[in-house]
Image (cartoon, grey):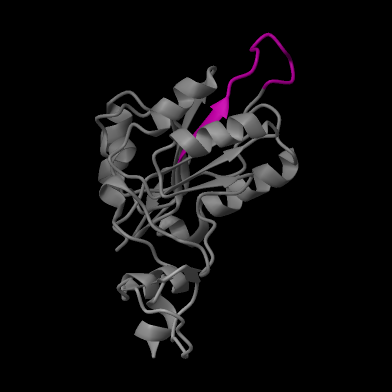
């Protein structure tokens, strides 16, 4: 059962395809108006040297949220970088920078095309900050360094971690689901079927030489002992 999320995404200074990464961030950051449980809500970008002329942030788009939540977040000290105007039931996409933890935009699932932007210098500290939520559905990292990628996989508290793709990436065959307040168990055809089945083990002792058709897989025969494991598929599915 999946119960929502607050997906973080971290972008290191070296990524395999910078232009492609930016395109993914802009497109998926506001895809479906942010109304997706694995919408990229928090974006952590590796900070560069401010003394270098080529260090700039160029927001191609922004994100949206409900007007009340945005106003409260801005009043709490968050910088509104772009967007935020309301027209009837629609709000402009917007990007908010450095939203405090005690604001709803930071700690809850917005379910709107809003992106919260943060800068970091230390990767491990950014991982700890990414875990600073009661959700844990999916996360993502963009980088070349596989050692850092596996560190993120091991330490980010989420049901899935995507490398060089957005946390909104999901296919039916994967074990999709979260931890903490993001749900229990996993979706995905195989994993849902497993949840509906019970594993059953048959152990047979002192039966001598057995010559019969057993509806199971994985026989272990040794001496007078016949162990039958994994009685699951054909026995329970029949």
Q: How many marks?
A: 0
Q: Main secondary structure of the magenta part?
A: loop
| Residue 87 position by quadrant | bottom left
Q: Nearer the viewer, residue 14 or 39?
A: 14
- Residue 11 at least partly seen: no
Q: Residue at x 45, y 58 (%)?
A: 33
Residue 10 rendering spot, x and y as whole percentages:
54, 34
**Residue at left 67%, top 48%?**
23
Residue 124's place in the image compared with 52, above or below, is below
Q: Nearer the viewer, residue 50 or 74?
A: 50
- Quadrant location of the N terminus? bottom left
Q: Is residue 76 left or right of residue 155?
A: left
What stretch of residues is rendered in magenta? 42-55
In which quarter of the view is residue 157 placed?
top left
Locate residue 136, reporting x and y percent. Answer: 36, 45
Q: On the rendered structure, is 204 left or right of 9?
A: left
Instruction: Kindly identify the residue that appears in the image at 65 percent across and 12 percent down.
Output: 49
């Amino acid at each position: 059962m999946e119960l929502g999320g607050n997906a973080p995404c971290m972008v290191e200074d070296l990524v395999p395809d910078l232009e492609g990464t930016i395109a993914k961030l802009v497109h998926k950051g506001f895809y479906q108006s942010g109304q997706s449980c694995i919408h990229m809500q928090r974006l952590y970008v590796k900070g560069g040297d401010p003394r270098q002329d080529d260090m700039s942030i160029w927001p191609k788009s922004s994100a949206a949220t409900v007007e009340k939540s945005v106003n409260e977040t801005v009043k709490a000290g968050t910088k509104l970088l772009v967007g935020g105007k309301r027209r009837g039931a629609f709000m402009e996409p917007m990007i908010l920078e450095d939203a405090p933890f005690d604001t709803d935009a930071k700690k809850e699932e917005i379910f709107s095309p809003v992106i919260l932007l943060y800068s970091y210098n230390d990767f491990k500290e950014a991982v700890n900050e990414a875990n600073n939520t009661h959700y844990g559905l999916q996360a993502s990292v963009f980088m070349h360094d596989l050692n850092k990628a596996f560190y993120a996989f091991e330490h980010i508290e989420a049901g899935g971690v995507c490398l060089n793709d957005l946390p909104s990436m999901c296919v039916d065959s994967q074990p999709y689901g979260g931890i903490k307040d993001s749900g229990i168990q996993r979706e995905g055809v195989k994993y849902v079927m497993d949840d509906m089945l019970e594993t059953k083990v048959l152990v047979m002792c002192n039966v001598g030489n057995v010559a019969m058709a057993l509806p199971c897989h994985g026989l272990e025969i040794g001496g007078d002992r016949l162990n039958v494991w994994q009685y699951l598929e054909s026995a329970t599915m029949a």
